[in-house]
Amino acid sequence: MGNKNQKYPTILGVLIGTVMGFFITARIRTSILSGNIMSFTCSSEAIIGALRNQDVVISDNDGKNLVFVGVMTAEKFLETRAVAVYETWGQTLPGKLAFFSSETSKTEADIPLVRLKGVDDSYPPQKKSFLMLKYMHDHFLEKFEWFMRADDDVYIRGDKLEEFLKSINSSRPHFIGQAGMGTKKEQGLLSLEENENFCMGGPGMVLSRETLRRVVPHIKYCIRNLYSTHEDVEIGRCIRRFVGISCTWSYEMQTIFYHNSSGNEAFTGNLKQKEVHRAITLHPVKQHKYQYHVHNYMQSIQIQNLRQRILILMRDINDANKALNDNSSFFNEEMDLPRLGKRPSLTKSNPEVIPWEFFTRVLFSDTNTNPKRRIEDWSKAALNNVVTRIMELINKFSLQRGRVIEFREILYGYKRLVPSYGVDYILDMLLMYKRYRGRKLTTAVRRHSYLQQPFTELQIRQSAQDESANKTINFILPLLGRYETFHRFLDIFETVCLLDNERVDLLVVLYQTQDLQTQTAKIIDHYKSIQDKYPNYKLILQTAEGTFSRASALQLGASKFQDDNLLFFIDVDMSMDKEFLQRTRLNVIRGIQVYFPIVFSQYSPKTYSKDPKNNDQISDDSGYWRQFGFGIGAMYKSDFDAVGGFNTSIQGWGQEDVDLYEKIVKSNLTIFRAVDPGLIHIYHKIECDSKLSKEQMTMCVNSGDNSYASLNVLADYVYDNLMADNGTISL
């Protein structure tokens, strides 16, 4: 009987629910038909207009009222640290910030400054810290969910702070930061029990609205009852007493709120470190100029993340297009979907087979004349970027999973460049798995990763008109004899520069010797004819006596120019085109950058072509790029003098260019180095002077051997001419 009576309320509830459902559905249908609810097919402009006509309050957090950050500072730092903070991470916060200083603080800086009454800039800033919390409570308690106390030498990543705080229930009391218990010297002097802690003030501390609401009414008591000189310890004590919570005991907090113990040198060097990438706050940035350094790096990480997001979306669009059989020209042409939207694949380059390079501690490659060599610095940097990125992806949800995976080393790997798509990697990595939630576990693991670092869409930035684009290039040419070669050089120079009215000058430093008097006379006569033909150009002939020295010749030529003149050191064997001239002007920046082009050096034409018309072609069999040649370079005279110029004690051929290059490397100048197809070193037989030093002789002989023919041509010669009938090579 009892069970039967219990069924009636259930049946009655079902009936009432059904009737109410029909009633609500009918009302909604009527409203739709009468037009009281906007159609879902109306334009976005109509929707925005409708919202603007209403008094709409967006209740979901739009990122602007999430957190209020109070930055503690002093008058002496308002023009430096405070400005740097406000102009960098202060603009990225999901909320607002203000700087709190003494009552008498003055500044011309345009920053949000709060002058706390009755507060000075004395240290320790205990009163300033407590009254800052009170100011937050009195003015912003109901406007923000979270409140943060920060120093003026901390860097806060606004995007990561927002992501972190939105994952926590702000309606409950929280006191978040890196837990501290004092140094060994301070233990027992801070009036803390063994299980008590405080949030370290340097990396920052975060309070929820409820925590601030409960603690502020007791601020006066806490100020009157201080047990130590550390304001962060006293805030922790006050919150523990009146809110009943301590700073978060969490393994993760020491990486989220990161403190670097390097002092003034912290975060002044390379920032590509796992600690920097994991952290929400970085402390301390003592030198305020490095706030901009850190900020630029963090912005680059955000750009990288956005580009990754764009690439993933493009792949999704490409997959959707294929599923819908949609070959829209907009997506295919404007967005280059066939290439950018292609999913990672080890076979994407079919039918072409692109070889892989294998590396462990060294690199093994079939595309280099040295098949086993050390890994170049640029390749190491690229590999570090890839590893950093993959570890971020692996640890993306480490907080939720209660574990972290650390990178140890790459045991071995393969890499290749696919010109149409990007770089492929196959990496065998040694990792360390650390589980800190539940049963703690630390163990080494290996992971085989297949990675693709794709190229993104082409981006073009139009640079403003620069006066350097019209700068005169002053060529300096050292010369000893070689009339026929000089005649050819002047023909090229005339065709490319003089006939087209290019802004160039030419200074020839001609060495005169007794045994080359006839050639010297021809050179002078021919050069004078060019001078007479083009009187508007500065075509200067500077003679020199003594033993020929390329270093002395170029140093003498450079001394004839002013500090703001653009110099280009060139050899008589070079050929050039018009485009090379403009690249030189744009690639040299006075006081900042010099240009050392990588020129194409021809092999002997006898080894690859019988047609003289093909001698200017660039191919693997016709020549090679001189990666280790530094004799051709451009820079301003002031920069040339600043590094010390050429070492004139070096006599004869070679080594003077390497010496100058090393000086520039050690200076503050940037070296821009790239292949320049407009510069071709025309082949000539190299004859090494017996008077050269041992090191110079080795360089000269090696240069001559490398410049004769390509490996393919030499291999074909061996097989075609030295192969015996029994299949062995006869020497």
Image: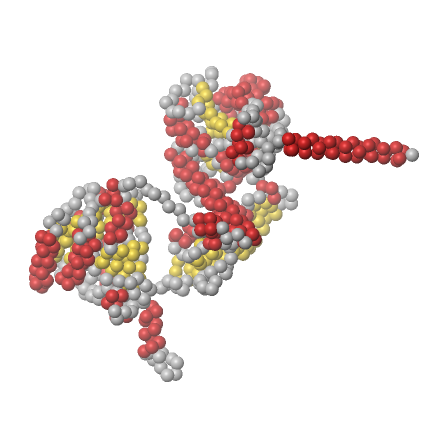
Observer able to see residue 560 = yes
Specify the quadrant that holds the N terminus: top right
In which quadrant of the rendered image does the C terminus lie? bottom left
Residue at left 20%, top 42%? 563
Against 90, residue 466 (above or below) is below
Residue at position x 34%, y 69% in the image: 712
Q: Residue furthest bottom?
A: 725
Q: Quadrant of residue 267?
A: top left
Residue 141 in the image: state x and y as whole percent. 56, 23
For residue 566, above or below residue 351: above
In depth, the one of 55 and 325 nearer the eye is 325
Depth check: give the residue in front, 687 or 590: 590
Quarter where residue 575 is shown: bottom left
- Name the foreground residue: 609 vs 176: 609
Could you tell me which residue is drawn at 41 percent across and 39 percent down?
296
Instruction: Judge whether 166 appears above or below 680 on screen.
Output: above
Q: What residue occupies the far front of the structure in this picture? A: 34
Q: In screen coordinates, is 184 left or right of 728? A: right
Q: Is residue 637 visible?
A: no
Q: Position of residue 512 (x, y in %)?
A: 10, 58
Quarter occupied by residue 728: bottom left
731 sits to left or right of 252: left
The residue lying toward the viewer, choosing from 704 and 347, is: 347
Q: Is residue 299 above or below residue 348?
A: above
Picture coordinates of residue 157, whole percent (x, y): 48, 36
**Residue furthest to the top:** 118
Give residue 586's position: percent from left, percent from top. 28, 46
